[in-house]
Image: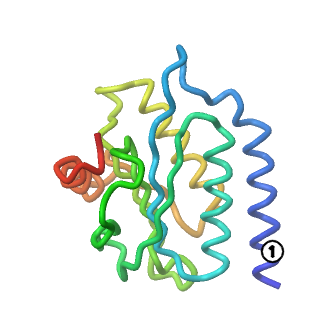
Amino acid sequence: MRIQRTMRISVVILALTCMTGSACVPAHGAPPMALLIADGTKTFASTARVGALAGAIRATGAFKLSVCFTDQEGLYDDPLVGVAECPDGAYDIVVYVPRGLDDGTADTLWIVTEVLPWTSPEGWGLVELLSDLIDRVFAGSAVAVDPTEDLWPAFVALVYQAEGWLR
């Protein structure tokens, strides 16, 4: 019953996002931002929410989306350890969805990016759009945290840039 409710909520959120997301495209014909979702979830309910998030992100038309599945244990583990190489080249943003969303051991989705408000106002608008989508899809069970809110995603962004994951 809880899974059915979660699926219904995900479908409603996806439909609402599709209806309102068409205006959220990059300005001046700029190419979409490359986005990687590193999905560490292991339950059906969490995976369904990640699927709804991916659908909402695609509906905006502002991101070129890739997804990889990870096997990390904790919230602060590097999700890309053990992933051989960037499947689609370097990304502008990596979103880490950790294991533990269902049992309450994790409540944060990390937005890892080098895009900051003072370096790229237009790009930062897309990061804020992404953060808003995450907050809507996960509806209080998890929140999005970006480099302006916590030092961990800022530090990981520097590491990922050196490793070639971020441009």
On screen, 47 above or below 51? below
Q: Residue at x 78, y 64 (%)?
A: 9
Left or right: residue 83 compared with residue 12: left
Locate the N terminus by quadrant: bottom right
Locate the C terminus by quadrant: top left
Q: Residue at x 55, y 39 (%)?
A: 129
Question: Element type at marker 1?
Answer: helix
Place residue 80 in its image quadrant: bottom left
Q: Nearer the viewer, residue 68 or 112?
A: 68
Task: Give coordinates of residue 106: x percent, y percent.
Answer: 45, 75
Amino acid residing under circle 1: Arg
Place residue 124 in its image quadrant: top left
Q: Residue at x 77, y 70 (%)?
A: 7
Scheme of image coloration: rainbow
Task: Give coordinates of residue 38: x percent, y percent.
Answer: 44, 63
Mark 1 packing: few (<14 Cα in 10 Å), some, or many (20+)?
Answer: few
Look at mark 1 in the image and give the residue it sits on: 5
On screen, 9 above or below 41? above
Q: Residue at x 46, y 78 (%)?
A: 99
Task: Give coordinates of residue 118: x percent, y percent.
Answer: 30, 27
Can you name the residue that lies furthest to the top here?
28
Task: Give coordinates of residue 58: x percent, y percent.
Answer: 64, 45
Left or right: residue 54 compared with residue 79: right
On screen, 29 above or below 78? above
On screen, 56 above or below 110? above
